[in-house]
Image (cartoon, rainbow, N blue to C red):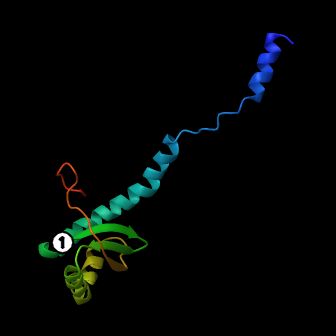
Amino acid sequence: MDDAQLRTIWLQRQMPDRSALLGQPLQSLMKYTLAKRVKQLGKLAQVWDELIPDCIREHTALESFNRGTLTVVVDSASHRFQLQTLLMGGLLSELQNRFAGALNKVRLVPGQFYSVDISGSPRYEF
């Protein structure tokens, strides 16, 4: 066998490169899925900031908005109770009226969050 034949056989036996670029799938994910959610959550955050009193809003963080359910993290039981009372007292209907999307319910979950990041700037900006 000559060098050309050996090289051809060697190339045929090499494992094919099965790696794929991540740019295109990530771009479509960002454009069609995440951008819509961020946009909806941003609009909802503006309405939330207008309606929720400052003393309670400082202890809450909007976590997600999925299928009409807004999930809110509340850092203490007392603030969670106050917010639940406000929501049952008509605040939920006011949120639904002001928000253009379909807001069915607000789910309050206990948890911890940080209002600023490592550099000291606000964690969420909408």
Q: Is residue 17 above or below residue 73?
A: above
Residue nearest the observer in this picture, 32 or 73: 73
Q: Along the horizontal axis of the image, is 67 left or right of 96?
A: right
108 left or right, relative to 24: left
Compared with 76, 2 (above or below) is: above
- Measured as percent of width and height from the top left, residue 36 is found at 40, 59
Is residue 116 positioned above or below 77 on the image? above
Nearer-the-camera pick, 118 or 36: 118
Residue at the left extreme? 55
Which quadrant, please, contains the C terminus? bottom left
Horizontally, residue 112 falls left or right of residue 105, namely left
Residue carrying label 1: 57
The amino acid marked with disc number 1 is Arg
Q: Position of residue 48 (x, y in %)?
A: 23, 71
Residue 53 visible in the shown view: no
Residue at (12% x, 74% y) in the render: 55
Residue pictured at 17% horizontal, 52% vertical: 120
